[in-house]
Every structure is written in structure tokens, then in C-alpha cells.
Amino acid sequence: MVDLKTINRIAKNFKIDSECVSFSELQSGHINDTYLICTSTNKKFVLQKINTTVFKNVIAVINNKQILSDYFKSITTSLNYQFVVFIETNSNSIVYIDPNNSYWNLMIYIPNSHTFDVAQNTEMVFEAGKLYGDFLLQTSDVLTTDFKETILDFHSMPMRLGQFDTALENTKIDIKLINELLNIVFNYREEMCIISQLKAENKMPLRVTHNDTKLSNILFDKNGNGLAVIDLDTIMPGIVHFDFGDSIRSICSTAKEDEQNLDLVEINLDFYEAYCKGYSIYTKTVLSELEITYLPLSIKTMIYIMGLRFLTDYLNGNIYYKVNHPEQNLDRAKNQFKLLKSVDSNHKQIQEITSLYFAK
């Protein structure tokens, strides 16, 4: 249990000129332990302990963040939004390793900022699109070879399908109960490998990708204007389709991903248009024609891969994702595959919207 004494013990290893007088835990993230701390001089910081269970190569995670932070500092005058600023330790690093071998970052708190788990309106989705689009633009000149792949094969469809096949073969679940989901998995399987194959053939340019482009990783002001992209732990080389597809999956659904009433789960085309309108402002001159062509397929691909991962975890006995009840991962899988079918049935409109905003 973290207390104020512990927070102060950690914080004093960073270059701040005052003592922490209060703190609160920030609950928006699901991986790291994150705290908002307030000091005796009324300065606020965000203190974060990196989850070394998820991030096996924590040094690579830190190095990636350091490279990006240094790059953003070098182009401050050309940035359209704020960026995460790390406070150095007393030994001039951005990470402090405590006696328990835990890794800590300290960041400047962006004042009057808010996060949202669910989009409130098209204006908010438009802002999200702009910020994630700007992130792609600002990092387009960074050498991807400087960054390490911190979670190997994170969005690899062949790897996720292999995990699913193994889980299906060894599960103790009666698979007759999930026949409908299995039909979806096998019916879409070949199509869902197209983007991974293009990546493997080096037909898609590698970019610096965020890899967790959900709404809650954007800070907004009180008026709903976007301020900054946060949560940089999953930054690594990837293709644009990972970020674009996952944004649409998480931001443009009409329901939360564990919604059990599947009648409520659809793709929100108004939100999709708003996101494309914002995202294309900064990206349509950066992206290649081939990348743009496969943006609609990336939506189905990222929805499918998440449905597959939820279903795999259910078959494995819920060993990866946190669950509140034994069937929650099954509910999540059903939810995602319903969203996939909604995207598929609206594919023509999605293509038309994409062409409208990304036309060269």
C-alpha cells in the first residue's frame, strides 16, 4: 500500500524543489500505477511506477520515452499541442529504480486537464483524431530504428491466431457453447491476415506508433479541446493501421467493450466521420496511397484481434485480463465480434468517408 511517506521517498530522487504534501491515485490506466502529487510550493506532478510484469524490457520502454521526449523538446516551436515532460532524477536519468527494483517516472502535470473513457460528442472525437493525427505527423521524421519493440509481436495476427489455436486445443470449456464465435473467427481469419502480411513484406512504412490510441490517453481542457497525447509506454515501431484501427475500435463504438446487450453495440458512423476529419488534417499528406487504402480494413483487423484475444483468454481460464466474473472475457469477445459485423455491414459508408477526408 502506497502512503505519503513512500511517495516522498520516491519523489526526493527527482529534481524537484519541494516536498510532497498530498497525493491521489489516477485510475484511468490499467497497466501502471499512477499518482497525482502536490508539493508544498503548489506544483503538481504525475508519478508513475512502470508495470514490469507487462513490460519485460523496461529499459527499452524508458529509452523509447527518452528519445521521444528529447525529440519533442528539440521541435517545441513547431508543435501544435503540449507533450509529456519528464523530470530528471538527481543522477540525470528519467527513471528512478528503487530498492525493490521498481521503476519510476515523474512528469510535469498539465494543469486543468481531464481524461474521458467514453466520447461525449462528435466534437470530442474530432479533437481525438486531431491529436493522434498530429502525433503521427510530429514523429514522421524520427528514425524508427532508434526505437525498440518493447512488446514483441504486440499486434501480430499470426501470433495471436497461434495463441488462439493453442488455447482452443487445450481448453476445458465446452466449445459447443461458443460455436457462433468460432464461426466468426474462422470465417474472417484469412482476411484478417492481409495487413500483417503487407507489413511482413515491407509494403507498409514503419512509423513511430503509440499502440494504445484510446480516448483516455488524450488530455482535454474543460471546454473539450485536446491538450496532449499521454501514456507513452507502448511507443515502438509499427504501422499506422495499428493506431488508426484501435482508435476507431475504442472510440467509435456505441457501447463499452464489456456491454452484454449486443443490440447496443454498433459502429457510430458520425463518430467515424468526426475522427477522420480530425485525423486527416495532419496525416493525409504524410500517409501513402497504400496506407490510406487499407485504413478501413485496419478497423476490422483491430476489432478482430481484440475479440480474438478476449476469447483466447476465456479459453485459457482468464489468466491475462482482469475480470469481475468468469464470463466477462466471453462477453467482451461477443461484444467485439458484434462490432466487427457492424463495421462489415457498413463497410461501403466507411470507405466513402475515408475517401472523402483522405483524398490527395
Image (tube, helix red, strand yellow):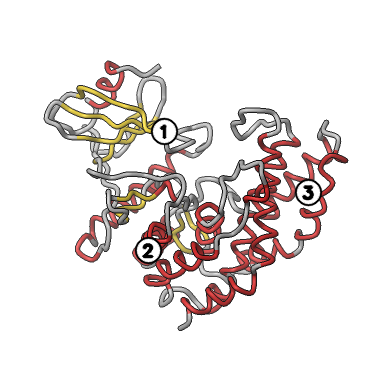
Q: Is residue 220 left or right of residue 277?
A: left
Viewer-proximal residue, 181 or 315? 181
Q: Residue furthest right?
A: 176
Q: Could you say where residue 304 lies in the image, as x and y percent from the top left?
A: 67, 54
Q: Quadrant of residue 19?
A: top left
Tag 3–tag 1 contact (CB < 8 Å): no
Q: Secondary structure at mark 3?
A: helix
Q: Which residue is mark 1?
A: 27
Q: Could you say where residue 348 lies in the image, as x and y percent from the top left?
A: 64, 74
Q: Which residue is mark 3?
A: 181
The residue shown at (76%, 59%) is 189
Q: Amino acid at mark 2?
A: Lys
Q: Is residue 274 left or right of residue 43?
A: right
The residue shown at (66%, 41%) is 260
Q: Secondary structure at mark 1?
A: loop
Compared to 139, does 85 lie above or below?
Answer: above
For marks 2 and 1 on the same chain, the one whose residue lies earlier in the sequence: 1
For marks 3 and 2 on the same chain, the one whose residue lies earlier in the sequence: 2
Q: Secondary structure at mark 2?
A: helix
The residue shown at (25%, 40%) is 109
